[in-house]
Image (cartoon, helix red, strand yellow):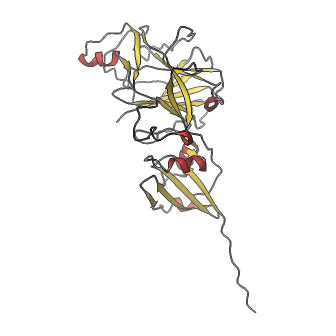
Amino acid sequence: MTFCTIKIMNTKYQYISEWTINLNSENEFRDLINTQGIFKDEFSAKRKTPSTSLQLRYDDDYLTQIRYIDVLNDSEIELSNSAKSFRYFENKKNRINFLIPTKKDTNSFIGEDATLNFTAPKSNLIEVPFQTIAKISSKDKPFEWLPFDDFYITYPLFTGLGEFLFLDYIEPLSPKLIGDYKNIEYPFGKMDPAGIHKFNRINLSMKSIKNLTEDEDLDFEYWYAGISGIPFWIQHPDIPKCPKTGNLMRFVCQIKTLESVKVGQSNLTSEKDYFAQYTKYLRFWGSGTLYVFMEPKSKVVGLIIQDT
């Protein structure tokens, strides 16, 4: 009597909120998966939207398939020869939450309020003032992992910096600039670093992607102010490493250009005709988005703007 041996294949999956992926470098591949990785239940919710996700399949711990999936598509991406040697690993999984303007009192908000006790960075390397963009509170569930209670996001909006800007938040209410920035452009000219440009406060509530209504369509951005958990990149993924530790930095949130966040006070001036357009509301360049990362051990923050 002849017996046949049947091999049972061990199959595992990973779910990624992103539509591009580097299959030529396993290190970059893993960094992307740790940053963009999501849980299966949120993948199931997201695949019903126009926002593309990737489903990765591993058989016996080796990558065998990547599917490109959204409400209109379900197609397979061809694997490179090197990608076929990529091994399965337990990646970090993230929860997607939308930051939605609300009239209710909240812990997190965009803009400033009268209780602000925060000193923005000043440096001879940045010849325009920093603006306080938002306060993110660790009292809100998506941000419980933050290493301090209140995280004030600050950025010099009137630069044309095309790379990550790093700040040291060892002193959370008085961060310091890290790095040497030699190629900074000033599209509106140089300004007094002590100048004032403040935004009115808009409170933020949090809502899971699993709880979105039909009116909260990812095709349209008018109903939300930002996103936490996973970056939704305008251009390509740009995931930073901490300049102090070399560790992969964790995504905090992204905040988009918002006409609803009005400038409440400003003494900045420029001879550029189009500067007046930037004195009315919160703008990241034309109509861009600010992406914010943090390494919680070193308390280093990395910020970058992407625009269309």
Image quadrant where residue 64 sits? bottom right
Depth check: give the residue in front, 126 or 9.
9
Image quadrant where residue 256 sits? top left
Q: Is residue 211 above or below residue 65?
A: above
Quarter of the image where the C terminus is located: top left
Image quadrant where residue 287 sits? top left
Instruction: Please state if 208 lies on the left or on the right of 224 as rendered.
Output: right
Q: Is residue 135 above or below residue 100?
A: above
Please give the name of the residue rendered at 62% of the width and 29% of the height, measured from the top-left corner.
Answer: 143
Depth check: give the residue in front, 114 or 167.
114
Q: Which residue is outermost to the right?
A: 1
Instruction: Please state if 58 lies on the left or on the right of 50 as rendered.
Output: right
- Residue 131 makes an appearance in the image: yes
Residue 104, horizontal then vertical, whole percent? 55, 20
- Residue 27 makes an appearance in the image: no
Please give the name of the residue rendered at 64% of the width and 52% of the height, measured from the top-left corner.
Answer: 89
Residue 267, horizontal then vertical, whole percent? 37, 6
Quarter of the image where the N terminus is located: bottom right
Q: Which residue is outermost to the bottom?
A: 1
Q: Is residue 273 above or below residue 249?
A: above
Q: Which residue is outermost to the left?
A: 273
Q: Is residue 233 above or below residue 99?
A: below
Q: How many marks?
A: 0
Please give the name of the residue rendered at 58% of the width and 30% of the height, measured from the top-left corner.
Answer: 294
Residue 247, horizontal then vertical, whole percent? 60, 36
Residue 63, horizontal then vertical, whole percent? 57, 60
